[in-house]
Image (cartoon, grey):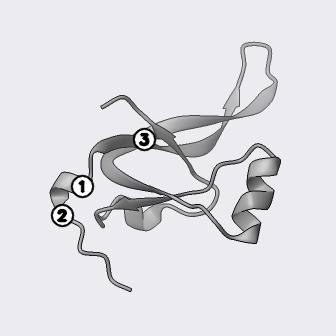
């Protein structure tokens, strides 16, 4: 079902974080998520289904994030994270 969302509904700011390998000062390696870009987004909180209720018992909250398509977001895959920013 197509949603009729307008630009006014994109009232949250999110950052896209990409996993990168970093070295510390003593030569050790670690993974770090660094902000690559930010976009306006809309949140839709899921409620109801058995999977959603089970995930809440595990301390997770399922949300659908809607953004406008652009060249930067075409490179995002499941290894990235998103972080909500202040408005």
Using the image as rendered, state which of residue 39 and residue 76 is in the foreground: 39
For residue 39, which numbered disc appears in the image? none
- Residue at image position (74%, 50%) is 56
Residue 4 in the image: above or below residue 36: below
For residue 6, which numbered disc appears in the image? 2
Figure quadrant of residue 38: top left
Crowd class of label 2 (few under 14; some 14 to 19; many from 20; radius 10 Å): few
Q: What whole-number distance in Å separates the C-alpha atoms at marks 3 and 1?
A: 17 Å
For residue 9, which numbered disc appears in the image? 1
In the rendered image, which residue does mark 3 sit on?
15
> Which residue, as the protein is rendered here, is positioned at the far bottom?
1
Contact between marks 1 and 2 (CB within 8 A): the answer is yes
Contact between marks 3 and 1 (CB within 8 A): the answer is no
Figure quadrant of residue 21: top right
Crowd class of label 3 (few under 14; some 14 to 19; many from 20; radius 10 Å): some
Query: Residue 36 placed where, x, y %?
Result: 43, 42
Crowd class of label 1 (few under 14; some 14 to 19; many from 20; radius 10 Å): some
Using the image as rendered, state which of residue 12 and residue 72 is in the foreground: 12
């Amino acid at each position: 079902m197509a949603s009729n969302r307008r630009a006014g509904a994109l009232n949250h700011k999110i950052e896209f974080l990409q996993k990168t390998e970093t070295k510390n000062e003593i030569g050790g390696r670690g993974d770090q998520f660094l902000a690559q870009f930010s976009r306006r987004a809309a949140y839709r909180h899921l409620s109801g289904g058995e999977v959603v209720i089970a995930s809440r018992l595990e301390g997770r909250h399922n949300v659908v994030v809607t953004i406008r398509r652009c060249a930067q977001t075409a490179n995002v895959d499941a290894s990235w994270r998103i972080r909500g920013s202040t408005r």
